Amino acid sequence: MQHPSDPPPLTAASAALLGALSPATVAPEDLYGPDGSVVYEHFTAEDRSEISPLLAAVRRTEGPILELACGGGRLTVPLLGLGRPVVGLDLSPTMVDILRSRIAALPAARIADGSRALVGDMTCFHLPERFGAVVLGATSIALLDRAGRHAFLRAAREHLGADGVLLITASSPDHAYVAGSRSSRIRAVPGPSGGPGAAVVTSAVTPDGLHRDVEVVQLGLDPEGRAAARFFRSRVNVVDADQVAVEAERAGLWLVARTALVETEDSTLLQLVRA
């Protein structure tokens, strides 16, 4: 997961919202940090996109499954339902703790031997198993810059079994992120003090069109009943499925199938094998 050394300025929408709610400056926090991870997990909890097509693709493989950038288990838990060993790996200890809690709450009979959640970097990891399926969903490939993607593709390739398949979702080429464009949405999440609240999620493409800044303003009430806000953000890279396919070939992987994901409208599933 790559983070810029110089944080970008707030978008006008987030700055206006924070200014209206809090007289004091609200310091930005990492969306994938300890508290940001919890907010992220809440506003993505009901997102079922990608799950059905990814499960269908994984069912056509055999052997253990590795999910990278697994987060709190939005996809990991359904993968466990296939009855095969599943290893989830994520850079965020908080996300991994959330996933471990979810796994612990499942019936023991549903968890195949060898299943586990690990803290680790998807660009540099070493596991003893070789996997029938390695999965990177949620267009999380965009978390990585070019060098990071190359390292990830090499590491993923090394962990594929003889007939293993690497499954990656990436932005569709015809879904262009226009330089300078932005969009916002609102999700119900707990507030900063744990009561009812909401998250305003803003996505803004940088003027050069190379990055997308994701900002989350968490709204609610403090213990005294006053309006309260916290601000989380992350910068991701703009990269589409065509570019990922080219980079994968350079890393020793062949593209054997690609599928437009109807549920998401803007992502493509790539299926790759060792060259």
Image (cartoon, helix red, strand yellow):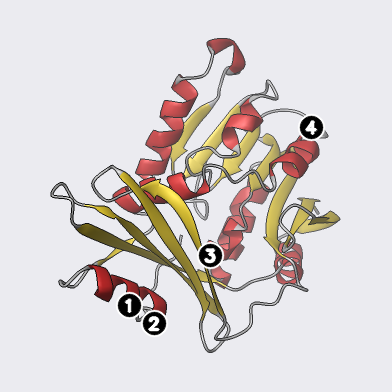
User: Of callouts 3 and 4, which one flags the residue occurring earlier in the amino acid sequence?
Assistant: 4
* 81, above or below 212, in the image: above
Q: Is residue 111 visible?
A: yes
Marks 1/2 in contact by CB < 8 Å: the verdict is: yes
For mark 2, give the secondary structure. Answer: helix
Nearer the observer: mark 3 or 4; the answer is 4
Q: Total number of numbered labels?
A: 4
The residue singled out by tag 1 in the image is: 15
Dot label at residue 59: 4
Label 4 is placed on what type of residue? Arg
Marks 2/3 in contact by CB < 8 Å: the verdict is: no
116 relative position to 248: left or right? left
Nearer the observer: mark 1 or 3; the answer is 1
* 100, above or below 8, in the image: above
For mark 1, give the secondary structure. Answer: helix
The residue singled out by tag 2 in the image is: 12
The residue singled out by tag 3 in the image is: 144
- Characterize the local packing of mark 4: few (<14), some (14-19) or many (20 or more) Cα atoms within 10 angstroms: some
Q: Position of residue 67 (x, y in %)?
A: 59, 41
Identify the residue at horizontal 69%, vertical 70% (top origin): 240
Q: CA distance from mark 1 to mark 2?
A: 5 Å
Quadrant position of residue 110:
top right
Identify the residue at horizontal 46%, vertical 34% (top origin): 99
